[in-house]
Image (cartoon, helix red, strand yellow):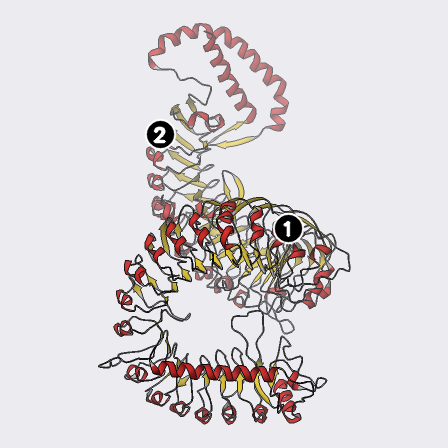
Amino acid sequence: MSPNTHSHTCMLVLIFLHLCCLTLLTSCVSESVECIPSEREALLRVKHHLTDPANRLSSWNASNPNCCHWDYVVCSNVTAHVLQLHLNTSTNDLDVDDFFGEIDDSIVELKHLNYLNLSGNTFLSMQAPSFLCEITTLTHLDLSNTGTFSEQKIPLQIGNLSNLLYLDLSYAFIGAIPHQIGNLTNLLHLGLGGNLHAENIYWLSSLTSLEYLDLRDANLSKSLDWLQTMQALPSLEELHLDSCTLGNYKLPSKLNFSSLLSLSISSTPKWTFQLKYLVSLRLSTSNSYPPHVRGPIPDGIQNLTLLENLDLSFNSFSSHIPDWLFRLHHLKSLNLGNNFLNGTISNALGNMTSLVTLDLSYNQFEGAIPISLGNLTSLASFDLSNNEFEGPIIPTSFKNLCNLREIYFSNLRCNQKVSEILEILSPCSSRQLERLGAESSNISGHFIDQIGRFKSLVELDFFNNSIVGEVPQSLAKLSSLTYMELSNNQLKGNPFKFLESMPFLSHLGIEDNLFQGVVHGDDLANSTALQVLYASGNNLTLKVHPNWQPRFKLTRLTMGSWKIGPSFPSWIQSQQDLQYLDLSNAGISDSIPTRFFEAFSNLRYLNLSHNNIYGELPNEVKLHGLASVVDLSSNNLHGNLPYVDGEVVWVDLSHNSFSGSIIDFLCHKEDIIGFADTVEVLNLASNNLSGKIPDCWSLGSSLVDVNLENNYFVGSLPSSLGFSSRLQTLRISKNMLSGNIPVMLKNASNLIALDLGENKLTGDIPSWVGDITNLKFLRLRSNNFSGNIPNEICYMKSLQDLDLAQNNLSGMIPSCVNHLSMMILNKSNADSFIQEDTGTRYLTSLPDLTIALDLSVKGIDVEYRSILGLIRNIDLSANKLSGEIPREITELSGLIYLNLSKNQLTGNIPQSVGNMESLESIDLSRNQFSGKIPPSIANLNFLSKLDLSYNHLEGKIPTGTQLQILEASGFVGNNLCGPPLLVNCTAPDDDNKGKERKKHHGVNWFFVSMAFGFIVGFNFGDLLVHCSYSKHGGGYYNKEFRFFHEWRQLSKIRKENET
């Protein structure tokens, strides 16, 4: 270490000791010391101008006159003057609300204030705080990470604070960095990150004591000499240039940086590899920028032989790990996470025995974990998550990692039993291991009693694995746990029996297991720290006293599928900090208390679906600010719809009995706020809503998914539905709508699914529908559409379900159907599910965005969700289509379901039908097809339904492994023979035998005729009354006659067998 570095390190130590002693003295304020009255009044005025949603300043009040005892205030133990104000909000603590409002200039009256921290707040209304520059006693000023002055420049008077040792203005101001900061010659720490720029930074040269400089995200492109200026700073030890715009700067003839120990930068200039004293190097970007560094890991890093910390995370490195990296033997921390690194991990990694922290997560590494990693006995933190590793992820050599504090191996193909993992880690690591994360890693087997040895565990995560059996009693020994996530496994028993011994547990996740039993209030009595409880999807029952008041304060609670009802749980009212609440399918048979909607101002997710909740929602209830997601579906609610406004993005009121018009719900009026323009998902399906659909959808500009199906709407479709350019799913089927499809709907260019089926719509299918190129599902069945199928449909390259059945369409099937590229076999374009992009994925509490649709396949309406993306269906049945089946349709090798039945199609079935290799169902029945069944149809190995009945087909049914086991009813009404029909085919060379048989047929036909006469005579009345006709070409056939015809064939076959 250089002499300069040593002297300044000593200075830092002295300053640190001075601050510690000062804090120690001032924090132990004597009970006899009273704060200065004028300073108390100044603090109260500061509080008055602050907005404090979390009531953090509750101790600042007149009934507590000694302000030296107030939170966030530090006084002198000698003089009682206020010395420090800690009014910062941690940006990492999402559960603590920040201050906003404004800082009153009364703070200037604190004449002895030396420490002021306002970081992490959002004083949006505040002007540039030039008055803060009057507090010349300040040695520490932190205004970083605020929205406080985000539209204003740094005040020039900042240069007056000549006593400052610490100044951080990062991400608080915009504009030019004032040169007056150069007056602060005592500065040790300077933060100027954010949307700032500098013409030059010559003023930096006067900050000779500066040890820490942060210029992240700043723009230095016009400062050509920045590097020369910085490298001359004699005390600079730590420099942050992440995502800094550097431009074409000058390189000094000789690079000094004699004291620089730590550098973070977003590029890899060659000069960085000349910093031979560098101990820490971070090549990364700030969160607001894409990665700058790509390609292989730079070879120049190997010159930095003193490196102890190397962070290459969040870049786009795409090589394997170079061999020279394993020779950096001083490395204590190596972070390669969040790149595209690939290949196997070399055994040489086990030679880096100084490593304390190793992060390989979020890459593309493959192969086995080297056994040599067991040599890293100093390792305290290890992350292997999100790679392509296979086999045992925790090799037996890991039993040597006695210093391990945290290990993560989530989202891997672990293929290990949980008992094996615990047995490997328990002998040595169990005493000090604090965090064990193994989410979604294909871990199986049973927990074993060894889990109880890990008594230092704070975090335990086995979410989404295949762990089975009872949770062992030894789990109760993990008394230090604050986070336990066991959801999505197959665990049994009652986990709440262990909570009494886990007083610090704040997060418990046990969703979707096989847990069962009764949970009493006493089981939760010791869970005072509990904030998150995910427990849906189990067979648990909650039995508590009607007046039970839990001791915990939850922010998130899911108890879906519990037995909680029949009464609405009154204890929920005590959980007013709830942000997420799921009581779906909980056996509640009650009305929602009116005060329920008033109590939860912080709620962002509300799911009370699939209960038996009844009654009307109170008229005054508005979902303003109540939740981002409201799901009250599948209940017995009735009356008018509630008003929706504020920040709601997801509304599901389907499967209830709401009635009346939706005009007030959707449209603005003078006395009604009306439909919120934030709503993205609206589901009102399966209610008793009626009247016309109002034409005010332009107010819902954010709509992505609209479902109004299965109601009693009448009239025409409103044109304004086309105003929502974000609309992806529109379902208005099973109503009584009439008229044409409005032309404005073509503006909804992002539509994925359009379902207008089962209405009374008329007119032609518009040709512009072909312009909606993203459309995957077009369902117009069971309407009164007429005219031809427009050729433009052929150019909908995303279309995978075309359902135009049960209309009055005529003409020929377009020969261009082979342009429907999604119906051509291509495994790469077949995701099993389809999700909507609502644009609100930053909300962690959104429901499942997977689209679910009712589709008619094989003649049955089925809801598809998880495999919707695999469906390929064309249904043109029950129309008046004519002509031949176009040969081009057989190029749709990915088509699964084809239904052309009940039309007037003629000609032969295309010989190349066997090319449609994915077909599972073909229905060509009740047309006028002729000729033979193409032999290639026997090549369709997935075929499970084939209906060719009631055509004019003839000849032998082709032989194939599938065809002979299909239903015989699919071949009747033709002149066909062979299995599965019971009609044998007569070969030409059997004519003589055939003539011989005819000698005997006269006798048999006598009995046949008698039988026929008996049937006709006995059932003639029934035939007149109950005759059921089926149109076939120009003729009509009743069921009874067809039955006799088939019975006659059966008798003939049996007689032939006898002879």
Answer few, some or many: residues within 10 Å of disc 1's Cα (few below 14, many 20 plus, some between 14 and 19). Answer: many
Q: Nearer the viewer, residue 591 or 175?
A: 175
Q: Say if 157 sits above or below 595 in the image.
A: below
Q: CA distance from mark 2 to mark 1?
A: 62 Å
Q: Secondary structure at mark 1?
A: helix
Is 435 situated left or right of 819 in this image? right
**Earlier residue among tags 2 and 1:** 1
Q: Say if 1050 sits above or below 863 in the image.
A: above
Q: Nearer the viewer, residue 2 or 198?
A: 2
Residue hosting label 2: 934
Residue hosting label 1: 495
* Circle 1: residue type: Pro
Where residue 657 sits, quadrant-wise, is bottom right
Quadrant in the picture for the N terminus: bottom left
Is 79 situated left or right of 236 in this image? right
* Circle 2: residue type: Pro
